[in-house]
Amino acid sequence: MTTDRIRDFLATRRPEGPCLVVDLDIVRDNYRAFEKALPDSSIYYAVKANPAPEILKLLASMGSNFDCASVAEIEMALDAGATARRISFGNTIKKERDVARAHALGVNLFAVDSHEEVEKVARAAPGARVFCRVLTDGEGAEWPLSRKFGCVPQMAVDVLVYAHQLGLVSYGVSFHVGSQMTKLDAWDAALSDARRVFEKLAQQGIELKMVNMGGGFPTKYLKDVPTAEAYGQAIFGALRKHFGNNLPETIIEPGRGMVGSAGVIKAEVVLVSKKADTDQLRWVFLDIGKFGGLAETMDEAIRYPIRTARDADDMENCVIAGPTCDSADVLYEKAPYPLPVSLTIGDEVLIEGTGAYTTTYASVAFNGFEPLRSYVI
Amino acid sequence: MTTDRIRDFLATRRPEGPCLVVDLDIVRDNYRAFEKALPDSSIYYAVKANPAPEILKLLASMGSNFDCASVAEIEMALDAGATARRISFGNTIKKERDVARAHALGVNLFAVDSHEEVEKVARAAPGARVFCRVLTDGEGAEWPLSRKFGCVPQMAVDVLVYAHQLGLVSYGVSFHVGSQMTKLDAWDAALSDARRVFEKLAQQGIELKMVNMGGGFPTKYLKDVPTAEAYGQAIFGALRKHFGNNLPETIIEPGRGMVGSAGVIKAEVVLVSKKADTDQLRWVFLDIGKFGGLAETMDEAIRYPIRTARDADDMENCVIAGPTCDSADVLYEKAPYPLPVSLTIGDEVLIEGTGAYTTTYASVAFNGFEPLRSYVI
């Protein structure tokens, strides 16, 4: 996944310190693959995955819409050339003054999952469209979602009726099957729930129009994942099964699936050592770790492919850790990671599949280390 | 722990958004308590806990030394008025060019825990003093250390002999009992190991001079913790037990214990909701979470005291979560947290004991939210 363009950039520019390099050609390919796989769905790029202006500009120019988590992200999408009608304020937890700001900027689509949030939107964005997020169980996702977002389907019905009563446009429902979801049938159960909410609203004379199917589309890390086409077929099949010929508008919100595979982090081996002269297990310390952008190694959830110039040599398991004076800054220890026996201090390593959820997770200055630099080429 | 000065500052200045306020009077009191409890030890403040310039300046003016994790932290300590001789480069994972930069700035005390690191220091800082970190088990610490730092005592002997052979000054040993350590006898076992390393080096004609006893001194969160005096007595007793009348120089590196209790985070309730109409459990969402500075709630390790203006009302358990579109951004869920039943959207909450390990852990801009602001008064 380290493209020739990324390899050339690193060889020519030789940036000092750890950095992320994102290849826009891959982002473009990923966008087209989603368009092709789900031609009737609108794509709302999840800005939080990587808000680099170059990425937002490219996607805006290709016709993408944007799923934003905050007013700052809305402003970034607008700056990149998106119109306000192409933006969804997808966070179910918003300050009322932020709803008002978004509304003043022209945003007209808001996520809710509670009566209290509906009241805020009704006051601060009167007449706006809302969709209610429904809880799904996230089984099969590598980065599982908790119950933090959404409410049970029956409550979603009440929330959308309430929104209607308060003068909002009850527009649809949303769900999220869990990030890095590799089970193709995960969308089926969620779409079945969505269909039931549509029916119950219709019984009260409220016609929902849209299903927001969220994200969850994976990036290939070490294990193979299904293709965008396979996802498209599975999702379209589930839509037909539950909605028949009366298909609703649909939205997808790829973040990781759009940019994850487009990025590579260049890092350096700072130390290779052991804890006892008699130990077999090596510790490999890199100049990037959990607080420098690799937060998703938390609980060793995401296992990134790591390439070195010595990968033809013998491999042996090691613990991989970051450079900070924080004992939690260990990337892979419970399941050690095979790296070349000949790996040595000063070697460069390439950490692939790191285009999503890295730069923005980086800490401001933990241990005095500057945040992860990023180059979009 | 919300002092009158912090309360007055918040009432007068009314800062917008979440922020940390640190009261320097408490930092001063904490420094004096450490001086009094361990009068024969040198205090090296762990800069990573909170590198705010006002804190570093105050401590430099009181005579503190500084434990630094990076060249950037060394420069901050120098800027605050510390001389290079009062600085320890305490990270065992250093790039050789950073060792050289520190050495050029006059730093002459380096941590090591491997032969490889000794070689770097010997090349980049010839003749410097080194201390070797020894592994301890961290039992009893609320924020346990892994095996990331240090080596077994027998290997520490070899490392220090090697340093001597390479022309460095083998100066001492260090250990760290684990952050937020509340067991007073934790230092006893570590000092016993340290004594054995001293003896083995002496047998080879190398006289160690210093024991770096690290940090671990706790901040009072919800549970009571022993006083600085109690720690001082326990540590002095263990030193006498293992070193008799021939006491070495000693260093302590308080970070959390120096600034944790001096800080309070002001935050706002963004949403109080339930996941089903029939649920008893409330979800309380704040405008600060794991990615905005409260990273130490990871695995619900640190349980901060949270104060509201409604604490006289009935309390009921709730889940507390942050404002980002990230399902991992939940602070307390496995062990729910009691908050007033009357707590409502827009209420201010004060999160106490947050002076350490908050501002620098904050992410650059996850979800578009700006990093935690900090006011030192």
Image (spheres, coloured by chain):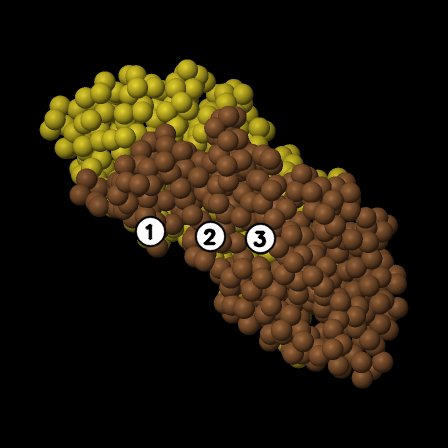
Chain colours: A brown, B yellow
Q: CA distance from mark 3 to mark 1?
A: 25 Å
Numbered tag placed on residue A256 in the rendering:
3
Mark 2 — on which chain does it sit?
Answer: A
**Secondary structure of residue under mark 3:** helix
Crowd around label 2: few <14 · some 14–19 · many ≥20 (10 Å): many
Q: Could you tell me residue A319's position as x and y percent? A: 33, 46
Q: Quadrant of residue A147?
A: bottom right
Q: In this rendering, do the residues under marks 2 and 1 share a single chain?
A: yes
- Which tag, 3 or 2, sits closer to the chain's start? 2
Write down the residue under mark 1. A336
> Which quarter of the rendered picture does the C terminus of chain A lie within?
top right
Asked whether, in this view, residue B113 is left or right of residue B361, the answer is left
**Secondary structure of residue under mark 1:** strand
Q: Three-letter amino acid code at disc 2? A: Tyr
Q: What residue do we see at 52% from left, 26% from top? A: A13
Q: CA distance from mark 2 to mark 1?
A: 16 Å
Please say if A67 is above or below A241.
above
**Residue B40 shows in this picture:** no
